[in-house]
Image: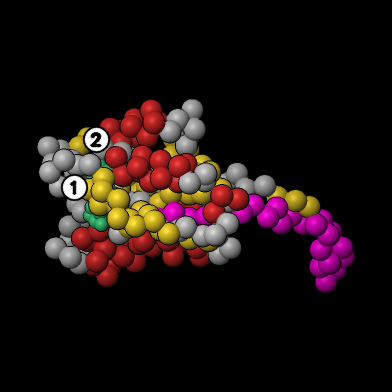
Amino acid sequence: MGQLVICDHPLIQHKVTFIRDKMTNTKQFRELVDEVSMLMAYEITRDVQLSPVRVDTPVQTTEGKVIAGRMLGLIPILRAGLGMVDGVLRIIPSAKVGHIGLYRDHETLQPVEYYCSLPSDVTERELIVIDPMLATGGSANAALDMLKKRGCRPTKLMCLIAAPEGVKAVQEQHPEIDIYLAALDERLNEHGYIVPGLGDAGDRLYGTK
Ligand SMILES: O=P(O)(O)OC[C@H]1O[C@H](OP(=O)(O)OP(=O)(O)O)[C@H](O)[C@@H]1O
Ligand SMILES: O=c1cc[nH]c(=O)[nH]1
Ligand SMILES: [Mg+2]
């Protein structure tokens, strides 16, 4: 079973509180999501392999460590996943980005696929699927299915807020995936929204409601 990691660094928890706040405006919301995503990228890259190199300081030669060329790909789920990409890219600038378009049908809560564009070398990369909200888990599972069907290797799912129902659904359908969250909330409501959550992440990022 993959790990379930709650990124409980105080800076992340502080910012998530303001992300949840309904008084936070679109500009502040976008900035906070960007900042939390950057901070979460530290946790997500914790297992990156290092290799030794010699480095000449002004004083003497010593041994340093550099990242051992692991190839990463970021796969945001449109729309809301886009709000997290730049923050992660600030920490992992060499990652390539592919896009999966999914929206959740408001009646059935089932994900509807409308776009998929992946980097040409995507099958050689370790992929991190990115979406701020993991509610029923339908969208994350559909994205992971789409990637696996194309011969790709997703290893991590990065979300801001999840409901226990969504975590369970991903763990059942894709048990090897490591899930990284800033918060694990109480439950879903009758409309499939996370409680207490933050509302509709896409609408809050882009000011569409
Ligand atoms: O776990 P689930 O029950 O599938 O719900 C989570 C999905 O819902 C939201 O997207 P939405 O459908 O609102 O699309 P948007 O990003 O375009 O707003 C969110 O960004 C996830 O993709
Ligand atoms: O609470 C939720 C659930 C799904 N999608 C959102 O944007 N928010
Ligand atoms: Mg939405």
**Residue at figure coordinates x 17%, y 57% from the top left:** 22
The C terminus sits in image quarter: bottom left
- Please name the amino acid that badge 2 sits on: Glu
Q: Which residue has dot 2 on it?
A: 186
Side of 55 relative to 31 (left or right): right
Give residue 170's position: percent from left, percent from top: 37, 34
Mark 2, ligand 2, within 8 Å: the answer is no
Q: Quadrant of residue 204?
A: bottom left
| Farthest residue, direction right | 60
Q: Which residues are magenta?
A: 53-76
In the rendered image, residue 145 lying in the magenta stretch gets the answer no
Is the magenta region chiefly helix, strand or loop? strand
Residue sitting nearer the eye, 27 or 100: 100
In the rendered image, residue 58 lying in the magenta stretch gets the answer yes
Q: Which residue has dot 1 on it?
A: 105
Q: What is the crowding at mark 1: few (fewer than 14 residues within 10 Å), some, or many (at least 20)? A: few
- Please name the amino acid that badge 1 sits on: Asp
Per the image, label 2 sits on a secondary structure element best described as loop
